[in-house]
Structures are given as C-alpha cells and as structure tokens.
Image (cartoon, helix red, strand yellow):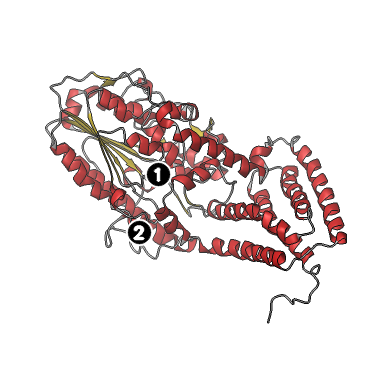
C-alpha cells in the first residue's frame, strides 16, 4: 500500500503538514513554559508569540514542502533542546552547552548516547517523519490553496499579535524578563552567537596571553628539595567521600592519614570543566574569568619562573581548550589519550602513576607535577578495573532512576578508586628526602537521580547542590610541616570554613611552594591564618558572577547548602 495516492490533489495534505511543522517546532516552547521560572504572562508569551511567527513562516509561500525544509534548522534545535530538557529538567541550550559540544570528545558522546535512547527515539519520531513529509511535498509539488494561506496568515497575525501583548505584559511582572535569555528560540541563537565569539577568542589565546608574566620568584632556600603534586579530579562530588562524612567506606586508606586535611564546605564556582580547571590553575575566579581568561597563563608558568621543573600528565582528551594550552606550558606534557582512538575506553587514572614515578626519579631540586584525572566521569563502571570495588552490584548501569542503586554503587567504586590512587601518591612522595605536599580537588560534582527531580550528570545550564559540592584535600609531609609549622595551625583553623575551590586553589598552591608573585593573595590561601572566605558566588552561562543563591538553584539545593553551612 502506498503512503500517498498519486491521484490525490496536491492541496489535500498541505494544511496538515503546515500545522504539523508548527506543532513540532512549538514543543520546546510548551515544555520550557512549564519548567522555567516564568510568570504566567511570560510563559504565555513564550508559547503563542513563536506559534504565530512559525505559522506565518509556514504560510509565506504556497509551496509547503519548501517551507518545511526551510524550517529544518528550527527542528534540529528543537530536538537538541528537548534532549537537554530530558537530561537536565530545565533551561535552554546554554552558551556553555555549545562550548561543551566543541570540547567533548566523541568517546564521551558515545558513552552518553546509549543511555538516553528514550528521548532520542521521541525526537526522531517527531522530526524525521515531518522532514520526510517535507521532502515528499517538494517532489510531489504539494501546494497550499489560497484559502488555506489566508486562514493560516490570519491565524498567524492574530496569534503573534496576542503574543506581543503578553510579551509586553511580561515586562510588568515582578520577575525580570529578558527576551534574549528567556524567549525561545531567540535565546538559543543569541547563546550560539556568544559561544562563537568565545570560540574565536580561544583561537587567539596564544597572541593575547603571549606577554603575560607572573614575575614569580622562589622564597625557599636552594638547599631544600621541593616536590609538589597537584591532582585534579573529574566529576567527584564531596557527598560520596567517606572522609567528608559519607556513611559508606569509599576512602578507607585515607582515613586518619597523618598530615592530611580535608575541607567539607568546598564549592566550585562552576559545574563545567572548561571553566573550572582554568580557574583552579590560574589566579582567576568567577569575578574575573570572563574578562581575563584570554590574557593570563597558568600556575605552571609561575612555577617555571620560580625555577621549578614542571610536568602535566593527563588522562583527559585534548580538546583545544584553555586546559590544553595550560598543559602545554609545562616542561613535560603527556596525554595518555594521544596513543588511543577517541572511541577506545579511557585509560585508568592509575596509569598516570608510572609517569609520576619517572618524574620523581629525575631527582630535580624543585618539581611540580600536575595529574589531571578522568575520575568519576560517566560511564562510572568504566572508570575502574573489572572486579574492583567494594560496592556491588555495579551493573547494569543504565542511565535511568530505576537503576540508581547500581549507578551509586559504580560511582562509589570510582571514589574508592580515586582515594586509593591518592593514597598511592602520598605513599610515593612521603618516602622522598624532600619537602613534599599533595593537594586534590575536583572540577565539579554530579547528579545521580538524588531526589524527585531525577537529575543526572553535570554541566546543566543551572547547577544543583550535588554538581558544585566538591572535595578539597591537602597533605603535607612531616618535613614540610616541620619547616613551616604555621601552615599546620592555619589548616586546622580553616578546615571548617567555607572554601570556593576555584578561588582558593591557585593561591594555596603558590603559598605551598613559597613562591612570591604579585598575583598571590594570602587571604585566599588555606595555608594562612588570615584566610578569609568570601560570599559564595557562581559564574553563570554568560560569565557573570552572581550570588550563589541567585544563580537559579531551587529550594532543595538551597536547603542542602544551608545544611552544609555555605548559605
């Protein structure tokens, strides 16, 4: 049986196709009107104004097939928007989401796609048949009758007009209404333009940062050998660390470890890797990142200026971001993924340890080693060797709330694996005849279907408590503590204070190494008694620093942050 009868008049199915295209393009508008924090008038405007415009666009020509194909770009973005709403529960396609597409490797994408097949199936069922019908309409020359065009245009004008009225009323609401951020699809195209500008800035980074210098010098005597290891975790949330109060034994080898200090009230100022890691490794924080990231170099350069041999070892993929540029500042730079296909499983983080061993064995007087891990990145069960871990069952680990027990078990195994690796690092550098120290934090945390919202993963346009609550650990060797006993006192005094990890990390490490630079702020160092926590802030999608409680987080997250003592 043929889908369409060739003898059928070309006008019969045309009106159906016109309104079908309007309907499928309008799905994100309806969904967003329910999920976003909009007033009633704003929500209505966000539905009926685009509905009127879509209808007018579809009736601009009687050739309905051509009009349908011209709307493909809107359908593609609508499909993308629906997938993100399914994953994160709310918000539009953000600037950071466009940048995540650029900086995420195909292996990560393939790991995720297999776990969101439901929503992918839904969007394919909505948009592929519509596009196919558009192609058929072009080939069979379907046309809209004059009567249909008149009705469609009249409907479009009246609907758009009513939408404009509600649009204007939206500005009188108690909630601030900003069309370029609140009105779909204007906001997603605006965000795409912002993302394109940031990507352009990224390509010019080497020129704009070329003359930057820290004017750094070492204040430590040459007779003292120094070895410092900075470990940057991935997707590790503090709530699953036994060391920080979790009720499962995820960090058994770090418990009661001599010389180790943990900070339970640490918050990252972003939930995205491409912002967090550059802030951790530079003097920038949420207030200065947007204006200055293209003009600074990393902590690696500060250490090199102070006479250190530097090494950067990564289990991440290169993605031509600021992180890559920072890594390449090091005297020795190794990415484990360089010898693997992007579709191969990641190396285990413990494969970084032989590189650390080799660096230590070089026996240089001043050494900085940065280890950038893959930590607890989804798919969790792939982050540790088969059979490893105390928590079972850890599979199947499908990305639905029905499998939360298995997901949590696998995730807790990744935390145990990371903590074992940190214990191994401490064991290695504790035997060196030198002043040694290790500092660890994660770029951000993770949602794992923790409440009725059923949020999953990270990098959502609006963060959750679990995505920004991160661990911060500092270990100092006995020789270091003997040389600088005042740091032990300061760490103890600061351990229960609020810590903005992306603000304190750089200054703490600079202080740890005894480096003098105009960019060092002692009030931001956890090794100083004068450490002064500032009010919690968050860098939003448009690189604006806003009070944490005003970044869009909901009551559940605010409640948890208050329990933690952050707000």
Of 393 and 75, the residue lying toward us: 75
Q: Quadrant of residue 334?
A: top left
Of 45 and 421, the residue lying toward us: 45
CA distance for labels 2 and 1: 24 Å
Tag 1 residue? 319
Image vertical order of residue 122 relative to residue 533, above or below = below
Name the residue located 80 percent from the left edge and 58 percent from the top edge: 62
Residue 374's x, y, as percent? Answer: 34, 48
Residue 377's x, y, as percent? Answer: 38, 51
What's the mark number on residue 215? none
Name the residue located 59 percent from the left edge and 63 percent from the top edge: 124
Marks 2 and 1, the one that precedes in the sequence: 1
186 relative to 246 in the view: left or right = right
User: At numbered mark 1, what does the secondary structure look like: helix, strand or loop?
Assistant: loop
Please rate how many residues cluster around mark 2, counting C-alpha atoms within 10 Å: few if below 14, some from 14 to 19, many from 20: many
158 relative to 259 in the view: left or right = right
Name the residue located 74 percent from the left edge and 35 percent from the top edge: 171
Q: Is residue 427 visible?
A: no
Of 411 and 31, the residue lying toward us: 31
Residue 503's x, y, as percent? Answer: 41, 29
Q: Is residue 259 visible?
A: yes
- Which is more foreground, mark 2 or mark 1? 1
Whether tag 2 and tag 1 are in contact, CB under 8 A, the answer is no
User: At numbered mark 2, what does the secondary structure look like: helix, strand or loop?
Assistant: helix
Figure quadrant of the N terminus: bottom right
Image vertical order of residue 288 relative to residue 142, above or below = above
484 relative to 109 in the view: left or right = left
Tag 2 residue? 381
Q: Quadrant of residue 12?
A: bottom right
């Amino acid at each position: 049986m043929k889908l369409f009868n060739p003898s059928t008049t070309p006008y019969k199915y045309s009106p159906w196709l016109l309104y079908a295209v309007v309907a499928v393009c309008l799905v994100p508008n309806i969904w967003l009107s329910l999920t976003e924090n909009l007033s009633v008038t704003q929500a209505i405007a966000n539905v009926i104004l685009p509905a009127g415009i879509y209808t007018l666009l579809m009736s601009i020509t009687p050739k309905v097939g051509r009009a349908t194909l011209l709307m493909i770009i809107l359908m593609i973005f609508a499909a993308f928007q629906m997938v993100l709403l399914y994953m994160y529960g709310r918000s539009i396609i953000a600037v950071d989401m466009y940048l995540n597409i650029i900086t995420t490797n195909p292996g990560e994408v393939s790991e995720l796609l297999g776990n969101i097949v439901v929503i992918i199936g839904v969007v394919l069922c909505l948009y592929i048949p519509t596009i196919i019908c558009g192609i058929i309409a072009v080939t069979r020359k379907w046309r809209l009758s004059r009567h249909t065009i008149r009705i469609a245009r009249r409907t479009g004008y009246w609907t758009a007009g009513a939408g404009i009225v509600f649009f204007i009323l939206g500005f009188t609401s108690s909630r601030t209404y900003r069309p370029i951020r609140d009105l779909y699809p204007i906001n997603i195209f605006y965000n795409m333009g912002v993302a394109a500008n940031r990507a352009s800035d990224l390509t010019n980074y080497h020129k704009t940062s070329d003359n930057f210098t820290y004017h750094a010098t070492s204040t430590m005597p040459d007779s003292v050998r120094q070895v410092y290891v900075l470990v940057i975790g991935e997707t590790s949330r503090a709530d699953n660390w036994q060391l920080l109060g979790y009720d499962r034994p995820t960090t058994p080898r770090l418990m009661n470890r001599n010389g180790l200090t943990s900070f339970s009230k640490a918050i990252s100022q972003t939930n995205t890797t491409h912002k967090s890691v550059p802030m951790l490794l530079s003097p920038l924080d949420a207030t200065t990142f947007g204006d200055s990231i293209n003009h600074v170099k990393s902590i690696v350069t500060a250490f090199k200026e102070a006479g250190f041999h530097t090494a950067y070892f990564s289990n991440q993929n290169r993605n031509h971001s600021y992180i890559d540029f920072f890594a390449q500042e090091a005297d020795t730079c190794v990415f484990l993924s360089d010898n693997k296909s992007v579709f191969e499983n990641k190396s285990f983080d413990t494969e970084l340890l032989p590189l650390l061993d080799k660096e230590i064995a070089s026996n240089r007087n001043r050494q900085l080693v940065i280890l950038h891990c893959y930590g607890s990145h989804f798919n969790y069960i792939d982050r540790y060797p088969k059979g490893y871990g105390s928590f079972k069952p850890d599979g199947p680990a499908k990305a639905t709330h029905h499998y939360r027990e298995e997901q949590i078990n696998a995730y807790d195994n990744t935390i145990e694996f990371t903590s074992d690796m940190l214990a191994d690092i401490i064991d290695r550098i504790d035997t060196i005849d030198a002043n040694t120290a290790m500092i660890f934090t994660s770029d951000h945390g993770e949602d794992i279907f923790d409440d009725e919202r059923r949020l999953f993963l990270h990098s959502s346009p609006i963060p959750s408590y679990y995505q920004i609550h991160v661990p911060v650990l500092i270990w100092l060797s006995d020789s270091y503590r003997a040389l600088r006993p005042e740091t032990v006192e300061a760490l103890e005094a600061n351990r229960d204070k609020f810590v903005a990890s992306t603000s304190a990390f750089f200054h703490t490490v600079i202080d740890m190494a005894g480096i003098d630079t105009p960019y060092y702020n002692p009030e931001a160092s956890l090794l100083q008694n004068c450490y002064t926590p500032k009010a919690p802030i968050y860098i939003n999608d448009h690189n604006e620093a806003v009070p944490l409680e005003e970044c869009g987080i909901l009551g559940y997250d605010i409640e948890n942050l208050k329990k933690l003592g952050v707000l």
